[in-house]
Amino acid sequence: MTQQRLLRVGQIVPSSNTTMETEVPAMFRMREYEFPERFSFHSSRMRMKKVVKEELEAMDRDSDRCAIELSDARVDVLGYACLVAIMSMGKGYHRTAEARLTGQTERNGAPAPVVTSAGALVDGLHAMGAKRVSVVCPYMKPLTKLVVEYIESEGIEVQDYIALEIPDNLEVAAQDPARLTEIYKRLNTANTDALVLSACVQMQSLPSIQKVENEAGIPTISAAVATTWQLLRRLNLTSRVEGCGALLSGRY
């Protein structure tokens, strides 16, 4: 009997995040029905309770420690699972963070590629050829505007957005993902190339991604879907997971 290939996936997560350690493994587990690879998941946490700029900056400074800890476990790939922490640090910062954290794994003698949710979202939209998007965010309006400006700085027009204005990170996770099937209808989606149903790794959306895509007839993604897509690419694996929207269709 051929031994199955086991790959270790590391995630750097905010201490109050409860979603990326459920949605990302769920997508990888769905993939296992079709492909032979198997995965284990490992996390290191950065302290953060309120989604405000000061806490996000302090949290980001702690990400180096997390990368080193996860490289101690010899993970095969690393995901930095906080989109707004990266985007609030300045335009293009995902490239800086990915290079810095990859360098930490290399200096620790266990090199591993690093993916950020911010970079994955931008790269995923580009891969799908999306020039114009509409976005749902749970953040307060000032942070939502930072996210919008960051996406636009990467050459993608944000046609419309919704800010749900939920400051507490645990409250963000407590939102019913089924509500997104109604919330997105408040967006202007005329001539929109893609919907970002959750531009936040903490706001659950996985059960609604395919439903909204089918109903709206518009490719629909989330920060978690984009992160999963990018993790699979860095592992040189086929990025196909059934029922998770266009980006994970295997075409990209």
Image (spheres, helix red, strand yellow):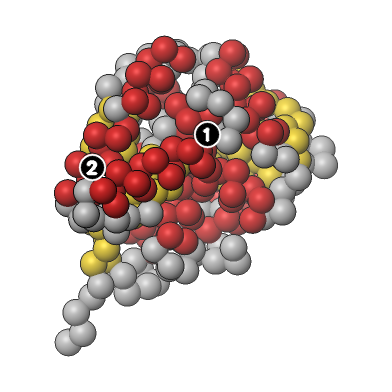
- Count of labels shown? 2
**Towards the viewer: 129 or 75:** 75
Q: Amino acid at mark 1?
A: Tyr
* Secondary structure found at label 2: helix
Residue for point 76% across, 31% down: 159
State which quadrant residue 28 falls in.
Answer: bottom left
Residue for point 35% across, 46% down: 103
Residue 179 horizontal/vertical position (percent): 53, 29
214 is higher (above) or lower (below) than 83: below
Query: Does residue 105 appear in this view?
Result: yes
The quarter of the image holding the N terminus is: bottom left
Residue for point 66% across, 26% down: 149
**Towards the viewer: 44 or 221:** 44
Q: CA distance from mark 2 to mark 1?
A: 20 Å
Residue 104 horizontal/vertical position (percent): 30, 44
71 is higher (above) or lower (below) than 177: below
State which quadrant residue 145 falls in.
Answer: top right
| Residue hosting label 1 | 93
Label 2 Cα neighbours within 10 Å, binned few <14 / some 14-19 / many ≥20: many
* Secondary structure found at label 1: helix
Q: Is residue 252 left or right of residue 160?
A: left
Outermost residue toward the right?
191
167 is higher (above) or lower (below) than 67: above
| Residue hosting label 2 | 68
Residue 156 horizontal/vertical position (percent): 72, 40
**Towards the viewer: 138 or 43:** 43
**Towards the viewer: 88 or 43:** 88
Q: Amino acid at mark 2?
A: Ile
Tell me, yes or no, whether the two marked residues, 2 and 1, touch with CB atoms within 8 Å: no
Residue for point 59% across, 63% down: 252
